[in-house]
Amino acid sequence: MVVENNNNDRPPPPFAAVVRYLEELRADGSINMFAAHPYIMREFHVDHIVARQLLFQWINTLRATRPIGPHQFSPDDMFPADDK
C-alpha cells in the first residue's frame, strides 16, 4: 500500500515512526486501536484519509506477522464508498 498525503505539503511520515507510535499506544491499552486514526492525525499532522491508510497498513502488518486472524483490512472495510 502506498500512502500519499494529498492534503498536506509534507510527505507522509515514515512508516517505521508510525509503527513505533502505534505500538506505544497499543501497549498503553487505553484506546481501541481500530479508533487510533485521530491520534495518528494529531501526532503526524496528516488528514483522516492518510491516517486511516497508515492505521490499516499497521493492522495488516500485524496480521501478517502475528496470529491475530486471517482478514486483511482496508479503509473501505470501515468506511465503504457510496456506490449511489
Image (cartoon, rainbow, N blue to C red):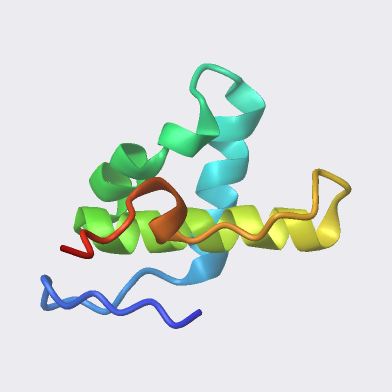
Q: Residue at x 27, y 61 (%)?
A: 81
Residue extending furthest front?
Answer: 84
Q: Residue at x 54, y 44 (%)?
A: 22
> Against 24, is 54 above or below?
below
Q: Measured from the top left, where is residue 18 in percent x and y? A: 49, 57
Q: Is residue 70 left or right of residue 51?
A: right
Q: Is residue 25 left or right of residue 47?
A: right
Count all numbered tags in the image, as a single digit.
0
Which quadrant would the C terminus be assigned to in this image? bottom left
Q: Residue at x 21, y 59 (%)?
A: 82
Q: Measured from the top left, where is residue 13 in percent x and y? A: 37, 69
Q: Residue at x 26, y 48 (%)?
A: 41
Q: Is residue 53 left or right of residue 9?
A: right
Residue extending furthest top?
Answer: 30
Q: Is residue 17 left or right of residue 81?
A: right
> Against 74, is 14 above or below?
below
> Against 30, is 21 above or below?
below
- In the foreground, 70 or 54: 70
Q: Measured from the top left, where is residue 68 in percent x and y? A: 81, 43
